[in-house]
Amino acid sequence: MRVLLTTCCIALLCASCAGSAALDGDSWGIRRRFDGATPSIMSISDINGGTPKANGAIQSLPIRSRVRAGRRVSIAAQAGIAPAWAAGAALFDPQLEHALDWLGLIATQDHPDIELRLTLMPDHGARHEQRLHPAAAGIVIDLLLPVPAQPRSRSAVLDQVLATGLHEAAHVLRPRSAHDRDDDEYRASLVAACFRLEGSQRGDRINLGATRVHAPREFTRQRSATAAQAVQHDLASVLGQPSMRGDDHAGIKRLLAFCMQRLAKPTL
């Protein structure tokens, strides 16, 4: 069982290509590249928008990783905040295992090997980072995510980080039959939300209707924000109320049944 350091509020509108209320001004994206001899995956991170531009190269240190059946989830941190995150990092293992479960759930036979590589960064200093990895032998999703150096709950922040990574992984691992962009955005937001639901614990408060994201003008970001709001609306409708406790097992079971049903649809 994971350790929850303090009571926290989970806003499920948390992992979106367009950012979120919790990660305002941040965005991520994944692009497939076919302009070379080898297909590749480009991971794009735009973080800490609205703050002064960060200076200097990124120097990251490994924090923790877990591997299972060709899938890997690894957490690193920028050197300045790495000591705070490295202390007691073994406590993160259940959350990383949970993320591996979800990678297995959304992956297909076309994607046997995949790594979710997430680097924790200070929550100030704007950066635009593009990281390119060949896709012939496997898929690497390589993102930067801003976090507080001393959060009230590292566990809650890490869940949000992992949910963001899984959101982008869902875009890469979408079924071949899923061609509609709106369906793809909905599916990615559903994966992130359901991952956080399944990892909720006693002391968490889950908001399904109170959080709202201001839809940005840029079309792609707007579509992502709209899809995340649609997921939140659907989950609240299934539950019959806009919020719940993290130990409401019956409610979570009902929501997860909805998640599994929707994710099983080949066109979602």
Image: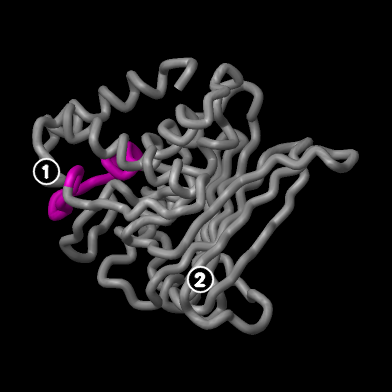
Horizontally, residue 128 falls left or right of residue 223, namely right
Where is residue 187 drawn, in percent x and y? Answer: 43, 31
Where is residue 180 drawn, in percent x and y? Answer: 53, 25
Task: Give, as a three-letter code, the residue at label 2.
Answer: Met
**Helix, strand or loop at disc 1?**
strand
Specify the quadrant that holds the C terminus. Answer: top left
Q: Residue at x 9, y 37 (%)?
A: 241
**In front of the other: 245 or 234:** 234
Cα separation, mark 1 vs mark 2, equals 31 Å
Where is residue 93 drawn, in percent x and y? Answer: 41, 52
The label number, if any, that marks residue 13 in the structure image: none
Horizontally, residue 34 falls left or right of residue 161, namely right
The label number, if any, that marks residue 121 in the structure image: 2
**Residue tagged by mark 1?**
244
Q: Residue at x 43, y 71 (%)?
A: 85
Q: Is there any visible trace of residue 105 in the rendered image?
A: no
**In front of the other: 234 or 94:** 234
The residue positioned farthest toward the front in the image shown: 217
Vertical position of residue 151 compared to residue 103: above or below: below
Task: Give, as a three-letter code, the residue at label 1.
Answer: Met
**Magenta stretch encompasses residue 48:** no
Horizontally, residue 162 falls left or right of residue 42, namely left
Q: Residue at x 51, y 46 (%)?
A: 219
The residue positioned farthest toward the right in the image shown: 37
Q: Is there any visible trace of residue 53 in the rendered image?
A: yes
